[in-house]
Amino acid sequence: MTKRDDDPAADLLIQEVDEELKREQYLKIWKKYGNWIVGAAVAVVAIVAGHQGWQAWQQDIRSKEAARYAAAQAIGEPRQAAEAMAALAADSRTGYATVASLRQAGLLAEAGDVAGAVKVYDRIAADGGVDRTYRDLATLRSVLLGLEGGDATALTQRLAGLTSGPWRHSALELTAIIAHRRGEVDKARELYRQLADDAATPQNLRARAAEMLAALGGSTKKG
């Protein structure tokens, strides 16, 4: 039997037939699906254009909300500013909702409405849709406002949930403050020592911890 490799003419014929079959197959596919293919191509262009339009719209929203936030910040009276922040938080379609709520709570505290501020902070802290950084910050500020007259055990329990998060050093400092106020000097001293010895503790907080540790008659491990 003659091998195909030994017959160049046969190879050429097979190649031509193969190309013809490919063309026929292509024409059949195009005839059957051509309109769909064109439609899909148009859809891709529309999706790209739509995405670019969406980005532009989002940028416009962010710019407008940033302007509203700045305007609320500029209001001199804390309670009125808090109301403006609350309105922005309610209307916001971006991350300004959480930021505005946090600022609203801060302004309420400035206005003397501690209960109102704590309520807003606690709402943020309980919202699972909010990033943990903001939720933990809200918890921290709520506890801070509750130091005067709040239940020490409950406050300490709330702080315990923050000791592995982004605000862990501040949580430990507040826990030490509560312990000291309760007369638990040994516990406070140990917490301040942890903060003072931890190189990751923010510089100002670390300095405060070292001062408090010294005031309580303790010293760092290096000391």
Image: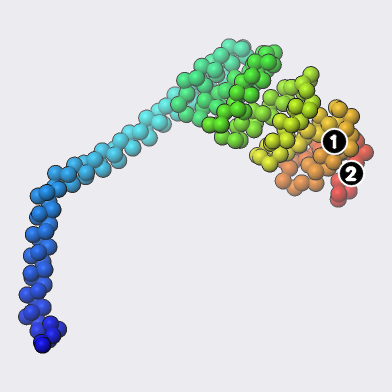
The residue carrying pointer 1 sits among few (fewer than 14), some (14 to 19) or many (20 or more) residues within 10 Å by Cα, namely many
Image position of 208 (left or right of 66): right
Disc 1, SS = helix
**Amino acid at the residue labelled 1:** Ala
Q: Is residue 138 visible?
A: yes
Quadrant, the N terminus? bottom left
Q: Is residue 75 visible?
A: no
The residue carrying pointer 2 sits among few (fewer than 14), some (14 to 19) or many (20 or more) residues within 10 Å by Cα, namely some
Measured as percent of width and height from the top left, residue 93 is found at 45, 26
Q: Eyeballing the image, is 26 above or below 1? A: above
> What residue is drawn where x is 85% and y is 27%?
181
> What residue is drawn where x is 86% and y is 27%?
182
**Amino acid at the residue labelled 2:** Ser
Q: Are marks 2 and 1 in contact (CB under 8 Å)?
A: no
What residue is pinned by disc 1?
188
Residue 144's image quarter?
Answer: top right
How far, Cα to Cα, is label 2 from label 1? 12 Å
- Which of the numbered marks, if any, corresponds to residue 151? none
> What residue is drawn where x is 60% and y is 32%?
134
- Which of the numbered marks, if any, corresponds to residue 219? 2
Q: Nearer the viewer, residue 41 or 128?
A: 128
